[in-house]
Image (spheres, rainbow, N blue to C red):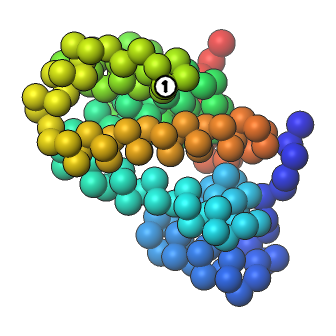
Amino acid sequence: MQLIEPLSPDALTPRQQVSYDAKIARDGRVTNMQRTLLHAPEAFDAYIEWYKLRDLLIPAFGERAVWIFCHTISAGTDCLVCSTFFRRLLIDKGIPPEAFVPTEEEQLLQSLARTFLANGHGVDADAWRRLAERHDTRTLVLLIAFGGLMVANNLFNNLLDVPLDEYLYDYRKTA
């Protein structure tokens, strides 16, 4: 049951409109989740920081690895919106989400992503050591913060039953 309707673009306050317009300028669209967050622009601003962290991590890990990390978290939390969003990104890059061979780095990120699904406990010591050998402390802190925001996005969508965006319909996982 959807608890809060995404805001219609024609019902925005001036403050909401500023955030909406900035998101359109950056990415060309505002999702149902983001239009739901716009009920509280401060919440929208907090969640939108996900993009800043993503942009800082892509040079360190590569875009594909970051999407695989996010997809692992999103599929693990059974978030329809986020898992379908990352399925789309992977599929559009020719990567079948359920049948690809992850690189060694992607395997390490998947291991870490599964830690987020285990209530933040049980980091695989070997995987962490191998990540720490490859990346500096700042990058690892960014990665953990980014993963935490990914979980927050998933929880927001799941708790409020945010509707799947129409542009994602064709990317839904089939049973």
Quarter of the figure with the C terminus: top right
Residue 77 visible in image:
yes
Around disc 1, counting alpha carbons within 10 Å, would you say few (fewer than 14), some (14 to 19), or many (20 or more)? Answer: few
**Foreground pick, 108 / 98:** 108
Residue at the far left in the pictured view: 133
Q: Quadrant of residue 101?
A: top left
* Vertical arrangement, residue 109 with respect to residue 101, above or below: below
Q: Nearer the viewer, residue 83 or 146?
A: 146
Q: Is residue 58 above or below residue 17?
A: above
Compared across the picture, whether 70 is left or right of 33 comes to: left
Q: Is residue 169 left or right of residue 4?
A: left
The disc labelled 1 sits on which kind of residue? Gly
Q: Is residue 9 above or below residue 75?
A: below
Please say whether residue 88 is visible from this viewpoint. no
* SS label for mark 1: loop
Residue lying furthest bottom? 14
Write the residue at 41% across / 25% down: 113
Taking the image as shown, residue 1 lies to the left or right of residue 70, namely right
Q: Which residue is mark 1?
A: 120
Q: 28 or 48: nearer the eye?
A: 48
Quarter residue 147 falls in? top left
Q: Residue at x 62, y 63 (%)?
A: 44
Count of picture labels? 1
Residue under the point 69% across and 77% down: 16
Viewer-proximal residue among 83 and 51:
51
Residue at 66% across, 37% down = 155
Image quadrant holding the N terminus, namely: top right
Q: Position of residue 28 (x, y in %)?
A: 50, 66
Position in image of residue 171 (x %, y %) = 56, 32
Q: Position of residue 61 (x, y in %)?
A: 21, 39
